[in-house]
């Protein structure tokens, strides 16, 4: 049993979902506000191009994957849940916590899943890193930080933290296994007035661990890097690297009567499966749809946790002006 999926929104990112669900043998239909876009993809992949209403009314479609603009997420996802569909929705889950809570309630009332597309949670390098931390490979986590930087793609409708940071926040919340007790943020708007193109979110967690996310689309080169500092080692997941994306450093500190001194260790390259993260994410949704997995790793609750941090960060950045 594979599961039959309709992709709603076939633009820049939706096309990738269409490709992956097709390769997994689960694509049933494509839906887009521009009928010509849907029809072109339907012809390419040998499936139907449907209206949203027709797709939700089709009993053979078990799930929908939503890659529409974020302001439409709540409306589409609630309608899909009420139509008896499992729902996969790209990040952010919604633009307000209230909308996200309504989406969760609709899915629960229908007895269907609501999964959020926090892609890097399904990256095999991150899954390996998270497993190592859980197994105590670097001891207690002291600090973690994530950089998501590039030149463009510039947005005019949302701040860079809303566009870039959800993936990083999802990873950091997983690593810390807790919600932050303090959140502060700053932002800089240089390209489009009123739209931050640089953002820094600072978080404090129970027990004293801290983390930050630095995002920018006004950066000279691409840099996607997560660093986790523990008591007995450090882990680095550099997704923008061509190779050796996951590394373990056994650095230490020598304490004498004078100033502490670093004791450097060579980087150890950590192997991980070479699977495509998006394909793993799509397969996970299919496993939820077909009942092979009871609930998604990135559930509605996960999406709401990330959204609350984004909302608090936005409010903090506004107050910092």
Image: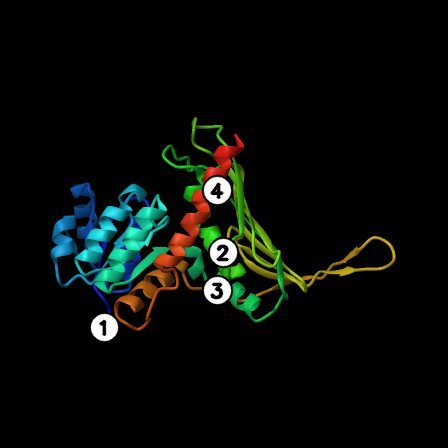
Determine whether 283 is above or below 199 in the image: below
Name the residue: 44% across, 59% down.
121
The N terminus, quarter of image:
bottom left
Q: Earlier in the sequence, mark 2 or mark 3?
A: 3
Whole-percent x, y for residue 320 in the image: 53, 33
Disc 1 is placed on an element classified as loop
Are there few (<14), some (14-19), or many (20+) residues within 10 Å of tag 1? few
Which circle, 4 or 1, is nearer the viewer? 4
Would residue 10 appear left or right of 183 to someone viewing this image?
Answer: left
Give me the disc on residue 127. 3
Are there few (<14), some (14-19), or many (20+) residues within 10 Å of tag 3? some
Would residue 229 appear left or right of 89 to someone viewing this image?
Answer: right
Closer to us: 16 or 103: 103
Q: In this orientation, does residue 13 appear? A: no
> Marks 4/2: CA distance?
14 Å
Name the residue: 68% across, 65% down.
232
Which circle, 1 or 2, is nearer the viewer? 2
Are there few (<14), some (14-19), or many (20+) residues within 10 Å of tag 2? some
Disc 4 is placed on an element classified as helix
Which circle, 2 or 3, is nearer the viewer? 2
Q: Earlier in the sequence, mark 1 or mark 3?
A: 1
Give me the disc on residue 1. 1
Give me the disc on residue 313. 4
Task: Name the residue beneath numbered marker 2.
Answer: 179
Q: Earlier in the sequence, mark 4 or mark 1?
A: 1
């Amino acid at each position: 049993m594979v599961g039959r999926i309709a992709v709603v929104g076939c633009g820049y990112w939706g096309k990738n979902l269409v490709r992956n669900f097709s390769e997994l043998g689960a694509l049933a239909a494509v839906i887009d506000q521009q009928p010509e876009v849907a029809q072109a993809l339907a012809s390419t992949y040998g499936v139907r191009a449907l209206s949203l209403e027709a797709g939700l009314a089709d009993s053979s479609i078990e799930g929908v994957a939503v890659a529409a603009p974020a302001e439409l997420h709540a409306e589409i996802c609630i309608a899909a849940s009420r139509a008896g569909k499992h729902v996969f929705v790209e990040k952010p889950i919604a633009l307000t916590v209230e909308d996200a809570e309504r989406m969760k309630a609709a899915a629960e009332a229908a007895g269907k899943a609501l999964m959020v597309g926090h892609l890097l949670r399904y990256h095999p390098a991150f899954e390996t890193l998270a497993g190592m931390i859980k197994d105590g490979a670097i001891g207690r986590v002291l600090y973690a930080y994530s950089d998501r930087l590039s030149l463009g793609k510039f947005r005019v409708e949302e701040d860079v933290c809303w566009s870039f940071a959800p993936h990083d926040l999802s990873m950091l919340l997983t690593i810390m296994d807790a919600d932050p007790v303090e959140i502060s943020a700053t932002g800089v708007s240089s390209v489009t007035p009123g739209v931050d193109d640089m953002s820094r979110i600072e978080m404090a967690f129970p027990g004293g661990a801290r983390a930050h996310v630095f995002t920018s689309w006004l950066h000279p080169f691409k840099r996607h890097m997560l660093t986790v500092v523990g008591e007995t080692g450090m882990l680095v997941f550099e997704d923008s690297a061509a190779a050796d994306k996951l590394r373990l450093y056994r650095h230490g500190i020598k304490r004498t009567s004078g100033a502490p001194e670093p004791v450097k260790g060579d980087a150890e390259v950590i192997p991980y499966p070479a699977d495509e993260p998006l394909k793993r994410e799509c397969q996970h949704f299919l496993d939820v749809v077909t009942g092979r997995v009871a609930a998604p790793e990135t559930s509605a609750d996960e999406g709401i946790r990330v959204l609350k941090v984004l909302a608090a960060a936005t409010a903090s950045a506004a107050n910092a002006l």
